[in-house]
Image: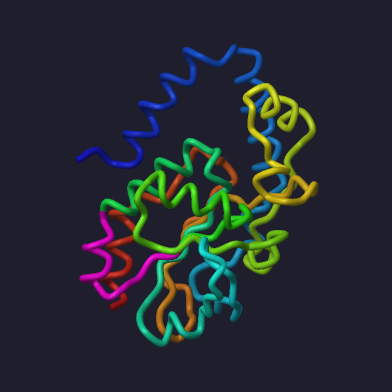
Amino acid sequence: MSTLKEEIDAYEVVKAEKVPAPTLATMNDATTDLIATGIENKALKTGDKIPQFSLPNQNNQASSIADRLDASMLVITFYRGGWCPYCNLELNAFQQMIPEFESAGAKLIAISPEVPDHSFTTQEKHDLSFDILYDKGNEISKEFGLVFTLPMEIRSIYDTFGIDVVGHNGDESFEMPMPATYVVNQSGEIVYHFVDPDYTKRSEPADVLAAVKANS
């Protein structure tokens, strides 16, 4: 089975063939600018406690983080939206390893600013067996220190790609979370974190599983 990085690398090759070089350069520059802000240093990290919260899932059913932690450790992954190919690759990669995560004593949840109708579509499209929680206005992502505003030049590029960020998120803020993955023990403490302002970089599920096993 391919690693997530291998799948992303393969996608990058296809992307470079299809997207004009000036567009790619603008996208890369925006990522470089975001990295330069040091935004990842503000995010929650290993050793921190996560906030307590309750969010609706893709079926509009309330889901309490406290109740989930009562039952097991959690793997929490934040993603931008079902329109993002990197997010889709990541969600699929985690889905393939759900049996291993559950055997190790952890459940997985995903969190996105996408409205439930869109997250439901994402779940169905990829046959995901875990919940996608709706973080309206990125309120919980902000508590994790993950949120940034999409630059104007990237909004224009996404428009040409047919990506309707406003429609997906149900607001006009153009805010979104950096991709991030956390392993949280039953005391609510983060025992593993991956946060990267480069949206093409994602946590490798095998590394996340190793962190679960090391802390179970």
Q: Nearer the viewer, residue 148 or 93?
A: 93
Residue stretch in magenta: 97-109
Residue 13, image x, y percentages: 41, 20
Which image quadrant for residue 109? bottom left
Residue at 28% x, 41% y: name it: 3
Answer whether residue 193 is visible to the viewer in this image.
no
Q: Residue at x 64, y 32 (%)?
A: 163
- Drawn side of residue 119 relative to residue 158, left or right: left
Q: Is residue 38 left or right of residue 104?
A: right
- Residue 103, magenta (yes or no): yes
Q: Is residue 3 left or right of residue 203?
A: left
Q: Indicate the colouring scheme.
A: rainbow
Q: Looking at the picture, does residue 7 appear above or below residue 96?
A: above
**Could you tell me residue 134's position as x and y percent?**
59, 62
Foreground of the two, 116 or 49: 116
On the rendered image, what quadrant is the C terminus found in?
A: bottom left
Closest to the observer, 11 or 110: 110
